[in-house]
Each structure stands twice: as C-alpha cells, then as structure tokens.
Image (cartoon, grey):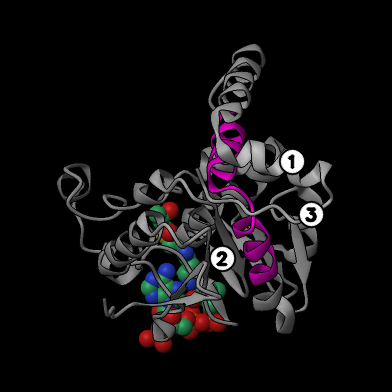
Amino acid sequence: MSYENIEVRIEAEKVGIVTLNRPKALNALNDALMTELGQALKDFDADPAIGCIILTGSERAFAAGADIAAMAKYSFQDVYKGEYITRNWETIRQIRKPVIAAVSGFALGGGCELAMMCDFIIAADNAKFGQPEIKIGVIPGAGGTQRLPRAVGKSKAMDMALTARMMDATEAERAGLVSRIVPYEKLAEEALGAALTIASFSQIAVMAAKESVNRAFESGLSDGVMFERRLFHALFATADQKEGMDAFLTKRTPDFRHQ
Ligand code: CAA
C-alpha cells in the first residue's frame, strides 16, 4: 500500500518499519497521518512474518505534536464527537506485537505521547521530549498527563506539563522515559538490532510479555502478579516453550515456529 504521510518498509523479512514523513511540518500529526499510521501498524500486526515494529521520524523531528494548523479551527463539538484529532490515536494500543519508538529530534505534545504509546523508546542523543500544549491554551490530549507521570514521576511530569520545558535525552534516560540513548548515527542500527532480537523469540511469548508488562499499569500488584502467573502457565501449552527449553538443555539455537 502506498501512503502520503508515512513510509513503510520491512527489514530482514521480520521487522516492520514505519517512518513518519511530513518533513515540512516536523511530522506534525494530522488525521490523515494518524489514519495511515494505524493502518500500517495493523497490517504489520497481522503479518505472521513480522516479529517487531519500529516507529521513527526524521533526524530533526520524531513528531512536533498534533497538527496545530489543522486543529486551530476545531470546535468542541468537532473534537468531542470524535470526528477529528485523537479519534484514530488509540489504534497503536491495540497492536499486540512490540512497537519500538526510535526517537531523534523533537518529540513534543502528541509526538511525545505517541512515543510513550510505544512499548519502549530508544533515543538519539539529540532527542527532546516535551508536553508544551499549555503554551497554546490546551493540555495534552493523547495520554500525556497519564503516561508521563507513570514514566517519570509526578514532579517532572508536572514541571513539563505546566512550564512546557523540554527534557533532553540524558534527562529522559535518567528519569526512565527512554530505555537507551545512542548517537544519532547509530539510532536506526540500534533500534533494528533490538527489533531483530525480539523477532528471533517466540511471538507468543513476546506478545504475552508485552501484555503482562502493560497490565502493571492497569492493576494492583496482586492482580498483576496473578495475571502474569496465568500467562506464564499458559505458555507451557505452546510448542515454542518445549522448543526453547529443549534447545537450552541440548545447547542449540531454538527454532521457534510461533506455535
Ligand atoms: N503543528 C503544525 N505545524 C507545526 C508543528 C505542529 N505541531 N510544529 C512545527 N510545525 C511547523 C511550523 O509551523 C513550521 O512551518 P512553516 O515552515 O510553514 O512555518 C515548521 O513546522 C518548522 O517549525 P519551526 O519553524 O517552528 O521550527 P523551529 O526549529 O523554530 O521550532 C519547534 C521547532 C520548537 C518544534 C516548534 O515548531 C514548535 O514549538 N512546534 C509546536 C510544538 C507544540 O506545541 N506541540 C504540541 C501540539 S498540541 C498537541 O500535540 C495536542 C495533543 O496532545 C494531542
């Protein structure tokens, strides 16, 4: 399928890569782009050959937020009815395979929120994160006030949402928002390496791990631990569990069939 606002490709026949591509607007996220992104992610999720997905932008911007030019004219009725803006933002949460955000440059507003909807963030050393919506008379509208405090704690989340200051990559890594920082030149390679590693494992176990970690943000500890235990037990019904453990014991590389 061809897209106007994103580029889509497959690496090593097992990693799906989506590149946000509205360079003139620093990858500002309009409805058309978010619809295309949702479709591309759903297609990769449904493709049995794909074991992991990478979402990235340009060197200058992962995404500078929701498209202010498009949004400026909307009324409450427009946005509340769900015809515009954030209508199609939840698709990424339905993706069951891992999605890695490879972030370079600005990840602001909806761009920061989009990165946080991914499963983890690998940042280039020039990355800048922020929730500057307060400067234009609104607040984050795609989960920023909820996911940011869970990632970096209340104090930094309040600081960013109330003062609109940006966090550089070093601070973001220290605060737990990003998992790794690499020089920009190494970003694509690092993200692909992580994605290939994930894609080499049992897809069923990978999906279960993602589901279980995400559960930590939706439940109390006892319920979360029980959820994890049930998924752990369930994996003993898979051929991949037999293969993985047999491969370890016989000192060979496992051949996961995702069964
Ligand atoms: N929407 C639409 N266009 C945007 C944009 C956005 N979010 N961010 C940047 N652009 C456009 C600029 O208008 C500019 O276009 P023109 O060349 O046609 O004038 C182009 O991208 C380049 O931007 P700048 O000239 O401003 O570049 P800069 O290097 O001086 O500044 C920046 C970069 C700090 C990212 C600045 O562009 C900026 O502050 N952007 C807005 C960031 C923002 O407020 N994001 C939150 C949006 S609201 C939101 O996201 C709601 C939500 O939670 C869902």
Q: Which residue is mark 1?
A: 246
Q: Which residues are magenta?
A: 191-215
Residue under label 2: 107
The reply, left or right, for residue 5 in relation to residue 236 is: left
Q: Can see residue 158?
A: no
Q: Is residue 25 left or right of residue 208?
A: left
Amino acid type, residue under disc 1 in the picture: Asp
Q: Residue at x 79, y 54 (%)?
A: 252
- Residue count near mark 2 (Cα–Cα under 10 Å), binned few <14, some 14–19, many ≥20: many
Q: Position of residue 254 (x, y in %)?
A: 70, 52
Q: Earlier in the sequence, mark 1 or mark 3?
A: 1
Mark closest to the chain's N terminus, 3 or 2: 2
Q: Amino acid type of disc 3?
A: Arg
* Residue 189 lies in quadrant: bottom right
Task: Name the one closer to the observer, 254 or 76.
Answer: 254
What residue would you read off at disc 3?
252
